Image (tube, rainbow, N blue to C red):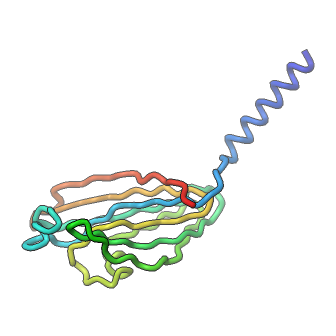
Amino acid sequence: MRNRLAVITFLTVSLLGAASAPAQAPGLRQYAAKFICGRAGGSQTAAFLAAPGSYFTVINVHNPALSASVEFRKKFTVGQPAERAGKVSEFFPAGLKADETMQIECRDIYGHLGIGVGTFVEGFVVLLIKELELDVVGVYTAAAGAGGVSTLHMERVPARIVQ
């Protein structure tokens, strides 16, 4: 009976310890969040197969840690029509304190890529973080005219381990 109680106590303490300190797999985590920004019309609608209108993206990045700050890097890549690769920015440092959230929006993307605000562009925001996880959600809106938002979509971006 004493051994049985010791085993139950050990298992309970082990499970509680695991629940309070979630294990993080070692490695570099990568998040690739799609973006689409700018006004599509004329040649963009044919080249990019985009409907005429204005497109906006906000990538929300949250540090879910309750007491730890995180440091990560971000870069921006552009896709071109006809299966051509576009511009890839350098990596930029970023960080969040415990439970903080940041937004990466079209104006930020234009600035990091050196592209004029309002230019139609699409690609990926790529985040790299060592060992810890982030919450990354893309929010996509589009408007056909001056009437306001005509569509809204949100998508959670999963992490993948990269070498």
Q: Residue at x 10, y 71 (%)?
A: 41
Picture layout, residue 133 above or below residue 125: above
Q: Quadrant of residue 103?
A: bottom left
Task: Measuring from the top left, give residue 8's x and y in whole percent.
Answer: 81, 24
Picture layout, residue 40 above or below residue 150: below
Task: Measuring from the top left, give residue 13's x and y in whole percent.
Answer: 79, 35
Q: Depth check: give the residue in front, 43 or 151.
A: 43
Q: Residue at x 59, y 69 (%)?
A: 71
Task: Measuring from the top left, give residue 63's x and y in whole percent.
Answer: 54, 60
Q: Depth check: give the residue in front, 17 or 76.
A: 76
* Count of residue discs: 0
Residue found at the very far front of the displayed protein: 83
The answer to whether 147 appears left or right of 5 in the picture is left
Task: Measuring from the top left, give residue 57's x and y in whole percent.
Answer: 30, 65
Residue found at the very far top of the displayed protein: 1
Residue found at the very far left of the displayed protein: 42
Picture layout, residue 61 above or below residue 116: above
The answer to whether 41 appears left or right of 69 in the picture is left
Q: Quadrant of the C terminus?
A: bottom right
